Amino acid sequence: MIRDLLEKFSWQMADTPPNGRGGSSDLIAIPLNNTLAAVIDTASRRVYLESDAALPKQTLEHYILDIVLPHLLSHDGHLVLHGGFVKSDAGGIGFIGPSGAGKSTLTASFLDDGATLLSDDTLMLHHDADGVTVEALYPSLRLFPDSLSSVLPQSGETRTVAHYFDKRRLSFARTAERSPADVLFYLDVAQDAEGEISLRRLEPRAACMAVLKNCFTLDVESREELANRFRRASEVANALPVYALVYPREYSRLAEIRAQVLSLVAEIKTQ
């Protein structure tokens, strides 16, 4: 799966280290843990895993699919966000926000309303004259055990995401790879003391910053990558409604949160 997905985007896994390790400007290293780094040769478009120890297959898959691949696509000029996306009867809905904000849980909960899940983790956004389209890199749904038992108790087969934490990866058949996007929600980590649900539209500048905070980037020192990322984030922020969502982190309130989100999306579609 790893090699096939990389090759889909014209990248390859390398079995031997690239020439000039440590001295070439074409080489970028992404530390993955204390003993493992992905060495990216941008000239030959190859990825080499430099490791001091053997790691389980599922952990390597997690590193490549969830971390390395999004960075590679950002380097190629795509706007790649860490977030979830569902296609519902109301429209296409995306969720972004910092780690721990509940993106995967909230995204997965929409399956109860019959929504189609594109991904809970990595999204590639395309903007053209018709609006914003979201593409999922691969079918991903990963939940911690408490979320899994509360949101999808009949989920069926799951497997470990990586050896160092207890998230589980759910297997499901992809029914959609792309979808038009109608709204993007930024999950604010601030919690309302009274457990209120708050939906507030962001002005384009604030929306752009929210998008930028959740972008992948390979070379943080590249002015070209920075300029491209800012331009694409600005296009999305001006073309797509972005709302800050503050919500109580309670499983019992998920249905209420979904109802308000879906009501807002339906209202946006009629404008």
Image (spheres, helix red, strand yellow):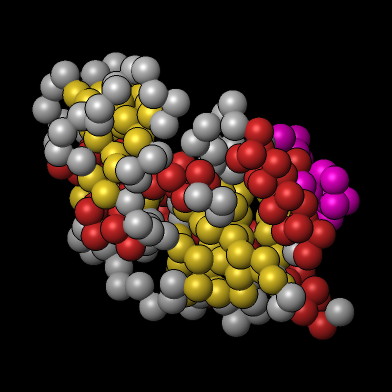
Tell me where residue 252 sits by quadrant: bottom right
Query: Residue 200: x and y, percent?
Result: 83, 53
- In front of the other: 17 or 267: 17
At 54% from the left edge and 41% from the top edge, which residue is drawn?
A: 216
x and y, in percent, of residue 189 in the image? 66, 36
Residue at 68%, 59% in the rendered image: 184
Give the side of residue 100 with respect to residue 173, left or right.
right
Quadrant of the drawing holding the N terminus: bottom left
Which residue is at a point 13% across and 22% down the rendered structure image? 53
Taking the image as shown, residue 146 lies to the left or right of residue 205, namely left
Q: Is residue 229 above or below residue 27?
A: below
The C terminus, quarter of image: bottom right
Q: Residue furthest left?
A: 54
Q: Is 200 in the magenta?
A: yes
Answer whether residue 187 is visible to the viewer in this image: no
> Magenta residues?
190-208
Q: Nearer the viewer, residue 30 or 242?
A: 30
Q: Is residue 10 left or right of residue 267?
A: left
Q: Residue at x 70, y 41 (%)?
A: 227
Q: Is residue 243 above or below residue 50?
A: below
- In front of the other: 96 or 237: 237
Res 66 → quadrant: top left
Residue 156 can be seen in this image = yes
Residue 165 in the image: above or below residue 7: above
Across and down, in percent, residue 248 comes to: 65, 45
Classify 247 as above or below 157: above
Q: Is residue 43 magenta?
A: no
Is 92 left or right of 264, judged from the image as shown?
left
Taking depth in this image into account, of 167 and 183 the one nearest to the observer is 183
Q: Position of residue 146 (x, y in %)?
A: 38, 44
